[in-house]
């Protein structure tokens, strides 16, 4: 082997060592997204090299065996164009052909519907702050966003109730079962263990010790929907609720009828619309500060919260909402409440106007004059940047600070309003596996800078050990 070839091999090995060391540093610092980008670059480069062996774009090439930069650029551009076309065609097919998207709501004679869409009571921006700053935050991974273990849950068991009792069961995220001795209610039902639609791109639910399906529940009489986002309105679950009565904000009816729910089984509400289902069951749709949409057109259906006066108990269900003064208005009009079931999860400073931080959730329950708060919209999906158990930890801490009772039942467990408050800090007992050795080893951390120095030296071997100097020594 010649000395030039020997140097060339050392340089190649040095480049590989440098790249692997940098990728290891990214991995240890939760920057896996950059590693995925590096892998993508190599996949694209390999694909280009393979395509260069074909006859693609060889018309003006003088040396086919040595492809020019212009030919490689054409191949790369064609690959990008093909990828964009596939994505656009797939999105177009989904939006136009998939029943998941729902129906066309049309327009509405409502004081909250103007400029071709529904609007919050106060002008609200869905996203605040820097878009690129938020994207950079998402590039930093965090193993604690997903528990990565099977979470302890309770098997659902139908509880025998007295005539005056009302029970509550939380199935994770925002799905709530409310029961009396003769009536069953479901709020924002998303059941099963499949990915959150649309299609395969939705996040997978956390692993639960027990799963929950409609066949495990008693027959559902009434279904309440807060808004039409996929994590609150699931087509498969809705279609399995045949025979129930549905109460939805304006526009959501078009989705349900598209999914073959009879029109006569659906009642639409504007904010502060009220209805007496029976002498023991009063309902009202109240405002929330959020947005809606299942396709390209946003805010074409209304969103809201629900007030239930049911079997002698008052229940508030927030749906999704940012914090606003309207909670005090609702509390004055319909309170006090036995329980406020309020979102406390999937929060971020970038969308703080349309989702509450846990401390705001507790304050909202106080504004509503609620005896206790049940924090929901957490512990099922990764939809934000916080740790999986941060919402429950923060909301209980805020409850202690503000002297507000917080209910924290196991997922799937049932409790009776006015009975013993479920306040087990069950998430603290979840044993999260130790991080991989490569991520936490001090030895690996010590070796990274040494490996970088060695790789740089190997890449610059010819400068450090010139061929001329070796030749003189040999003489």
Image (spheres, rainbow, N blue to C red):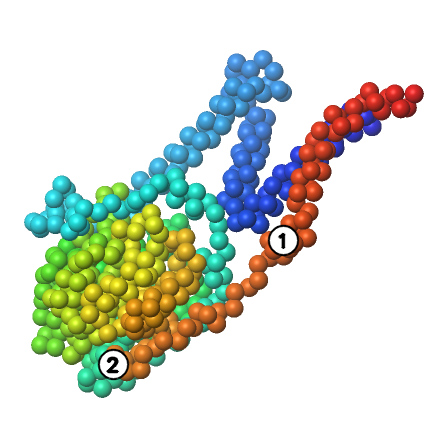
In the rendered structure, are the residues bearing label 2 and label 1 in contact, judged by CB atoms less than 8 Å apart?
no
> Which residue appears at 55% of the width and 64% of the height?
433
Q: Place residue 65 in its image quadrant.
A: top right
Between 141 and 183, the one lying in front of the other is 141
Mark 2 element type: loop
Up the image or down, 243 lies above or below 414; here it is above
- The answer to which of marks 2 and 1 sits earlier in the sequence is 2
**Quarter occupied by the N terminus:** top right
Secondary structure beneath disc 1?
A: helix
Identify the residue at image location x=17%, y=58%.
Answer: 326
Crowd rating for badge 1 (residues with CA inside 10 Å; few <14, some 14–19, many 20+): some
Extreme-bottom residue of the structure = 162
Residue 14 in the image: above or below residue 73: below
Q: Quadrant of residue 423?
A: bottom left
Can the viewer see residue 457?
yes
Please say if 308 is above or below 141.
below
Is residue 12 shown left or right of residue 257? right
Q: Position of residue 352 (x, y in %)?
A: 30, 51
Relative to 175, say whether 249 is above or below. Answer: above
Q: Quadrant of the C terminus?
A: top right
**What residue is rendered at 50% in x and 23% in y?**
73
Tell me which residue sits at (27%, 46%) in the image.
126
Front position in the image: 281 or 93:
281
Q: According to the image, label 2 marks what residue?
A: 418
Which numbered circle lies on residue 438?
1
- Asked which quadrant contains residue 19, the reply is top right
Residue 439 or residue 4, whichever sits in front: 439
Direction right: furthest residue? 475
């Amino acid at each position: 082997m010649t000395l030039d070839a020997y140097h060339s091999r050392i340089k190649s090995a040095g480049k590989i060592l440098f790249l692997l060391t940098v990728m290891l540093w990214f991995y240890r610092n939760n920057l896996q997204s950059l590693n995925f980008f590096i892998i993508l670059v190599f996949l694209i480069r390999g694909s280009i090299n393979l395509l260069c062996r074909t006859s693609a774009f060889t018309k003006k090439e003088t040396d086919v065996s040595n492809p020019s930069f212009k030919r490689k650029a054409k191949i790369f551009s064609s690959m990008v164009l093909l990828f964009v076309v596939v994505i656009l065609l797939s999105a177009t097919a989904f939006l136009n052909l998939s029943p998941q998207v729902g129906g066309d709501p049309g327009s509405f004679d409502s004081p909250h519907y103007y400029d071709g869409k529904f609007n919050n009571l106060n002008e609200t921006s869905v996203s605040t702050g820097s878009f690129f700053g938020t994207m950079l935050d998402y590039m930093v991974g965090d193993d604690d966003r997903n528990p990565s273990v099977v979470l302890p849950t309770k098997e659902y068991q139908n509880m025998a109730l007295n005539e005056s009792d009302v029970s509550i069961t939380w199935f994770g995220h925002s799905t709530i079962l409310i029961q009396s001795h003769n009536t069953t209610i479901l709020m924002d039902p998303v059941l099963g263990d499949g990915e959150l639609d649309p299609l395969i791109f939705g996040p997978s639910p956390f692993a639960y010790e027990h799963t929950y399906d409609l066949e495990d529940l008693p027959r559902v009489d009434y279904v309440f929907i807060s808004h039409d986002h996929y994590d609150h309105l699931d087509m498969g679950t809705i279609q399995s609720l045949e025979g129930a009565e549905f109460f939805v904000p304006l526009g959501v009816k078009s989705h349900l009828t598209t999914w073959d729910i009879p029109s006569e089984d659906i009642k639409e509400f504007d904010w502060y619309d009220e209805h007496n289902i029976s002498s023991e069951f009063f309902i009202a749709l109240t405002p929330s500060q959020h947005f809606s949409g299942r396709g390209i057109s946003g805010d074409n259906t209304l969103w809201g919260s629900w007030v239930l006066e049911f079997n002698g108990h008052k229940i508030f269900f927030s749906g999704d909402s940012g914090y606003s003064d309207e909670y005090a208005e609702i509390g004055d009009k319909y309170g006090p409440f036995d329980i406020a079931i309020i979102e406390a999860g999937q929060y971020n400073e970038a969308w703080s106007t349309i989702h509450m931080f846990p401390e705001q959730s507790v304050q909202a329950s106080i504004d509503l004059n609620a005896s206790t708060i049940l924090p929901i919209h957490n512990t099922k999906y990764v939809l934000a940047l916080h740790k999986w158990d941060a919402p429950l930890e923060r909301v209980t801490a805020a409850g202690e600070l503000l002297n507000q009772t917080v209910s924290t039942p196991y997922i799937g467990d049932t409790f009776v309003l006015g009975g013993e408050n479920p306040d087990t800090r069950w998430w603290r007992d979840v044993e999260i596996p130790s991080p991989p050795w490569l991520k936490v080893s001090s030895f690996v951390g010590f070796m990274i800078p040494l490996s970088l120095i060695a790789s740089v030296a190997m890449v610059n071997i010819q400068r450090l050990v010139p061929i001329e100097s070796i030749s003189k020594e040999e003489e």
